[in-house]
Amino acid sequence: MAQGGKPERMTLLSTKLKERKGPRMDMAPMIDCVFLLLIFFMVATTFSPMPGIRVQLPPPGKPNPNKPKGLIVRIANPAGAERVGTMVLNDEIVGFNEMFSQFINAPEDIKNMLIIQSERAVLHEQIVKIMDLAKQAGIDKIGFAMVARE
């Protein structure tokens, strides 16, 4: 018998119970499954191209000195608190309504193309609105031009 009147067997059993640890779960197989699923979804996913506007850029080199035939709209940066920049169509200041009527009434030889020249701070909203007016007026070709900096 052990000290204190308890049998040795009880002390061994009680120490084994004290040493006993709770159940452990191995995380490695679960992490492997997660990575396999991640790789599967990355490989199986297809991305569709975003629809947009096709733009045909000119070849690099010197700018063309010949003035193209067509309607030319110049848009200045908005002044102060204005949202819309000043629009000049063939050397005449116009608004959206006048621009649409001039697009429709333009001669056929220059009505086939619209060239938009805008400064840097012009909102895309204004440019897109001009493009919509041109399409409604029957202008099929729209080009963008830039003024060379000095």
Image (cartoon, rainbow, N blue to C red):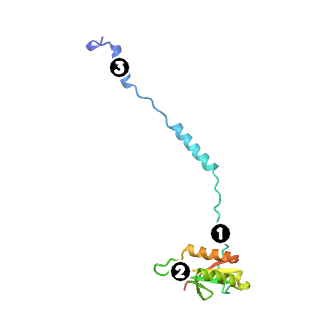
Image position of 51 with respect to 57: above or below: above
Q: Measuring 59% from the left and 80% from the top, which residue is drawn there? A: 96
| Residue at the extreme bottom | 91
Question: Seen from this angle, which residue lies furthest right?
Answer: 109
Q: In which quarter of the image is residue 102?
A: bottom right
Q: Does any portion of residue 108 appear in the rendered image? A: yes
Q: In which quarter of the image is residue 135?
A: bottom right
Q: Residue 114 at x, y = what percent? A: 66, 80
Q: Is mark 2 on a helix, strand or loop?
A: loop
On the image, numbered disc 2 is attached to which residue?
85
Query: Which residue appears at 69% of the width and 80% of the height?
Result: 113
Give the crowd class for mark 1: few <14, some 14-19, many >=20 residues within 10 Å.
few
Identify residue for label 3.
14
Label located before the other in sequence (2 or 3): 3
Q: Alpha-carbon distance for marks 3 and 1?
A: 79 Å
- Marks 2 and 3, how far apart in space? 88 Å
- Above or below, 67 relative to 5: below
Q: Which of marks 3 and 1 is in front?
A: 1
**Quadrant of the image for the N terminus?**
top left
Neighbor class of circle 2 (other Cα within 10 Å; few <14, some 14-19, many 20+) is many
In the image, 141 versus 17, the foreground residue is 141
Q: Which of 133 and 23 is in front in this view?
A: 133
Front residue of 113/7: it is 113
Q: Does label 3 or label 1 sit earlier along the sequence?
A: 3
Find disc 1 in the rendering and name its residue: 53
